[in-house]
């Protein structure tokens, strides 16, 4: 599968910043991939999403060196603060989600079906006639993800997309991603929620201070779960990662 | 600084024709640590906004200590009830992190407020001189929380205090809340993060469709798999471990689980 996004030795510095936010980053994401991006706050995960989708430096400014190829017609980004992404022009959630497709000049019927499909996927069809500004934080986050999906992006970058969702909605959102990828979208998802990310991503990279410090199978890179942390503190010997069944097998009875 | 009690009686609230709160009764004793959970759109955020006079109920009463909230302005309420928004950016406006944190106490005329201490407590010392919008979004959430803690309110109302935070930041928030709890401050935290709820709350109130659906101790609810399942929730990792290993005392905090596991004999064989 050809890469939709290919970064080679990419270093990116925000305007006026003393240090680069990304340093010598190389990775490829192909259609069908779900790549998890892990890293503590400030590690560069959000920046990586902006660079991989072309928003940095084109929209946010800054300097990029190295080689970047983006072979996508449309890139979608869902920011960590969804309310900043509302158009402010739409009176209903249905129109909000159809706004992107409509602005592509798609025929009315295609706009309608893209919006309906995206609303069904994110389970927000019941909100279709509500005013976007009156949604709760979690409802809004799902609507913004649906709006990004409705654009049928080739590359979709999600920045902590379930931060404000209740657990059921968070599961539903993550469960949608493999199907979206399978239909030909390359997905990058940055999140501190390692458990859910490991469920849907095949591969993962971990960033620290702007550099990729680990890459590989998601289960390995994202391995430090809450369970493993507790087991470690209680003196359980490695290897980690651990989940509850694995922990249970290791208790000598 | 001891806490004060919060009483919500028969409260209703509507956004236009849509009823968000349909008769809520809730009494929180001074010094209690309460988590407010429930699905998106259940009315959790709306309820918290009534506690600080950011919204006025269409029916019922809200009192905080000896104050009837109906007769108070939001800026008066800020001296007693600290409110951290779900979206921190809505409450940041100064030119530096330190100025932003100091704004609340200065506005209240509290010269001796622990501004520097709180900045350090939440791990913000290195960014104190930066513009709030030049720090990463999760850290901005901590800046807003620091601004609230610096006012030393008797009641803390926090909307999704751990959403988007990394592990280290989350631990700092939990530690900060435990310190306030030890001082007797009343805490009401809206959260979807059951791991956080386990660490920071003693009591859990569940909202659903504008009403209170459950109100139990954290230990009881988090060990009730069926009740959690009907809410679409799974127990946090600590409780999964407690259940699987049948640990004594129904531990919910990671420290309690680690304590219960100490002395455990581990098999050296790999998984």
Image: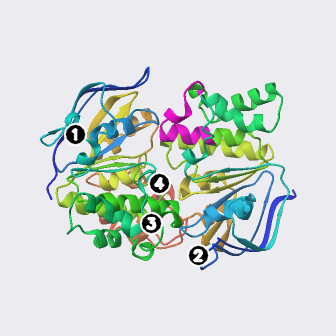
In depth, the one of A18 and A222 nearer the eye is A18
Q: Which residues are magenta?
A: A128-144
When the figure is inspected, residue B217 is found, relative to residue B91, above or below; the finding is above
Where is the N terminus of chain B found, in terms of image quarters?
Answer: bottom left
Q: Which residue is mark 2?
A: A209
Q: CA distance from mark 2 to mark 4?
A: 24 Å
Chain letter for mark 3, please: B
Q: Pointer 2: residues within 10 angstroms few (<14), some, or many (20+)?
A: some
Disc 2 versus disc 1: nearer the observer: 1
Q: Pointer 4: residues within 10 angstroms few (<14), some, or many (20+)?
A: some
- Horizontal placement of A173 versus B267: left or right? right
Chain letter for mark 2, please: A
x, y percent for residue A177: 68, 45
Reply yes or no: does residue A226 show up in magenta. no
Q: Which residue is mark 3?
A: B95
Disc 4 versus disc 1: nearer the observer: 1
Disc 3 versus disc 2: nearer the observer: 3
Which residue sits furthest bottom? A18
Please give the name of the residue rendered at 23% of the width and 47% of the height, measured from the top-left corner: B76
Q: CA distance from mark 3 to mark 1?
A: 29 Å
Are the residues flagged by discs 3 and 1 from a single subunit? yes
């Amino acid at each position: 599968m050809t890469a939709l996004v290919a970064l080679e030795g990419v270093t990116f510095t925000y305007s006026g910043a003393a240090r680069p936010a990304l340093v010598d980053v190389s990775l490829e994401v192909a259609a069908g991939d779900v790549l998890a991006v892990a890293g503590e706050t400030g590690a560069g995960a959000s920046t990586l999403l902006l660079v991989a989708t072309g928003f940095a430096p084109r929209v946010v400014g800054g300097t990029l060196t190295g080689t970047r190829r983006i072979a996508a017609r449309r890139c979608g980004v869902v920011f960590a603060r969804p309310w900043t992404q509302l158009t402010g022009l739409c009176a209903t959630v249905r129109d909000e989600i159809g706004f992107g497709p409509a602005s592509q000049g798609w025929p009315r019927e295609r706009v309608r079906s893209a919006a309906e499909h995206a609303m069904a996927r994110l389970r927000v069809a019941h909100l279709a006639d509500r005013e976007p500004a009156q949604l709760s934080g979690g409802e809004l986050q799902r609507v913004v993800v649906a709006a990004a999906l409705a654009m049928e992006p080739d590359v979709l970058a999600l920045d902590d997309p379930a931060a404000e969702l209740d657990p059921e909605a968070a599961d539903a959102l993550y469960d949608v991603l493999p199907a979206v990828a399978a239909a030909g979208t390359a997905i990058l998802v940055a999140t501190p929620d390692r458990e859910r990310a490991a469920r849907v991503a095949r591969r993962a990279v971990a960033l620290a201070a702007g550099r990729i410090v680990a890459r590989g199978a998601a289960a390995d890179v994202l391995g430090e779960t809450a369970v493993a942390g507790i087991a470690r503190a209680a003196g359980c010997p490695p290897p980690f990662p651990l989940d509850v069944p694995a922990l249970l097998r290791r208790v000598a009875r | 600084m001891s806490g004060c009690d919060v009483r919500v009686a028969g409260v209703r609230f509507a956004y236009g024709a849509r009823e968000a709160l349909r008769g809520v009764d809730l009494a929180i004793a001074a010094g209690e640590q309460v988590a407010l959970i429930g699905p998106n759109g259940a009315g959790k955020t709306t309820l918290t906004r009534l506690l600080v006079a950011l919204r006025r109920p269409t029916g019922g009463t809200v009192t905080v200590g000896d104050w009837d909230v109906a007769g108070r302005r939001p800026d008066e309420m800020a001296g007693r009830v600290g409110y951290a928004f779900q979206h921190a950016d809505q409450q940041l406006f100064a030119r530096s992190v330190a100025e932003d944190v100091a704004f609340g106490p200065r506005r209240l005329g509290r010269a001796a407020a622990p501004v520097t201490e709180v900045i350090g407590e939440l791990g913000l010392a290195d960014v104190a001189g930066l513009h709030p919008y030049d720090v990463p979004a999760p850290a901005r959430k901590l800046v807003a929380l620091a601004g609230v803690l610096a006012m030393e309110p008797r009641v803390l109302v926090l909307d999704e205090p751990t959403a988007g935070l990394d592990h280290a930041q989350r631990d700092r928030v939990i530690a900060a809340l435990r310190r306030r709890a030890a001082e007797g401050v009343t805490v009401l935290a809206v959260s979807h993060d059951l791991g956080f709820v386990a660490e920071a709350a003693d009591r859990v109130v569940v909202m659903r469709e504008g009403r209170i659906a459950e109100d139990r101790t954290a230990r009881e609810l988090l060990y009730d798999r069926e009740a959690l399942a009907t809410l679409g929730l799974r127990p946090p990792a600590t409780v999964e471990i407690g259940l699987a290993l049948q640990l004594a005392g129904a531990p919910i905090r990671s420290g309690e689980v680690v304590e219960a596991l100490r002395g455990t004999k581990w098999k050296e064989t790999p998984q």
